[in-house]
Image (cartoon, rainbow, N blue to C red):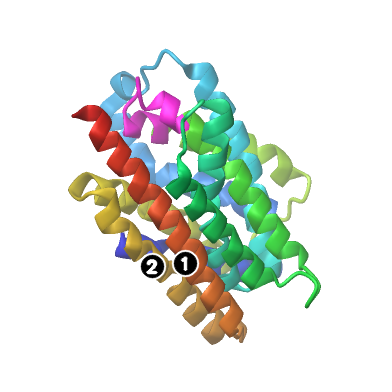
Amino acid sequence: MLASTVFFASMHACVRYLSADIHPFEIAFFRNLFGLAFLAPFILRNGAALLHTRHLNWHLIRAGINVLAMLIFFYALAITPLATVQALSFTAPLFTTILAVFILREKVRLRRWAAVVVGFAGVLIILRPGAQPIELGAVLVLLSAAIWAMTMIIIKRLSNTDSPMTITAYVTLFLTVISLFPALLFWTWPAGMQWFWLVLAGFAGTMGQLCVAKSFAYADTTVVLPFDFAKIIWGAILGYVFFAEYVDAYTWVGGVVIFAGATYVAYRERQIEKQNRS
């Protein structure tokens, strides 16, 4: 999980750097394209067995929603300090809990609701509405987190019948195809070292996803999830070194509060899952 935070923060820094000359929508396409290239050997080695599914329509719907979340998130990366993006992106599990109540009819009791409220209190600490103007980038990060939460609901359903690698293979394939269309609206051919940073973004994003999957395979969610907070640290370091971004105390405090709420939500879900199995 710690390695995944390094990869994801590096990918986000690449996106931020490239967005000065290349539209974020095009960057998203190349991230998916090169991510697919790194996964291709595994997909080809496993062949038809990996792509066997009874729910192709849900994979396509998931990918369509995922593309929307990614495009919004990449655009936010272009205009928002990296550490702020990392902190606000931790709200995705909070949105997932809320959506699970209305879509999956899950029962969420007092402690999980309290954690959700605490998490969103962290958002208010970062945004400080009334004390300062709310920036568009921050709103876009929250919107992408809410949309991403919808994909998590679909993944929960798909995981009942399909393996994690089948889900990953389909979303990578569909993301690459779907993200090409918005990219064409703003297309400019990359040049020189831009190709290197685009390849690095695709590699880092794919490696980050694989590291997260492996971390959950090796240890319990409640053990590995706290290490995800390191994304804020790497984001702050990369933002300072490469973009002269300074992280204020409100972002640090708000990030801790959001992360604490999201982590407790994950902890309670894991406890309830264990109780149901027993």
Badge 2 element: helix
Label drawn at residue 174: none
Amino acid at circle 2:
Val
Three-letter amino acid code at the position of disc 1:
Ala
Q: Residue at x 53, y 65 (%)?
A: 86
Can residue 22 be spotted in the picture?
Answer: no
Looking at the image, which is closer to me, 54 or 84?
Answer: 84
Q: Tell me, yes or no, whether the highlighted magenta stretch contains residue 159.
A: yes
Rendering coords of residue 17 (x, y %): 61, 71
- Kindly indicate the quadrant of the structure image that contains residue 166: top left
The image shows residue 141 at horizontal and vertical percentages of: 64, 57
| Residue 214 lies in the magenta-colored region | no
User: Which residue is more in the foreground, 2 or 35?
Assistant: 2
Q: Residue at x 54, y 18 (%)?
A: 57
Locate the N terminus by quadrant: bottom left
Which quadrant: the C terminus? top left
Q: Give the range drawn in magenta.
A: 155-168
Looking at the image, which residue sits at the far top? 54
> Disc number at residue 9?
1
**For the residue carrying disc 2, how many other residues have a C-alpha within 10 Å: few (<14), some (14-19), or many (20+)?**
many
Q: Is residue 74 rendered to the left or right of residue 136?
A: left
In the picture, measured across the screen, residue 182 lies left or right of residue 178, that is right
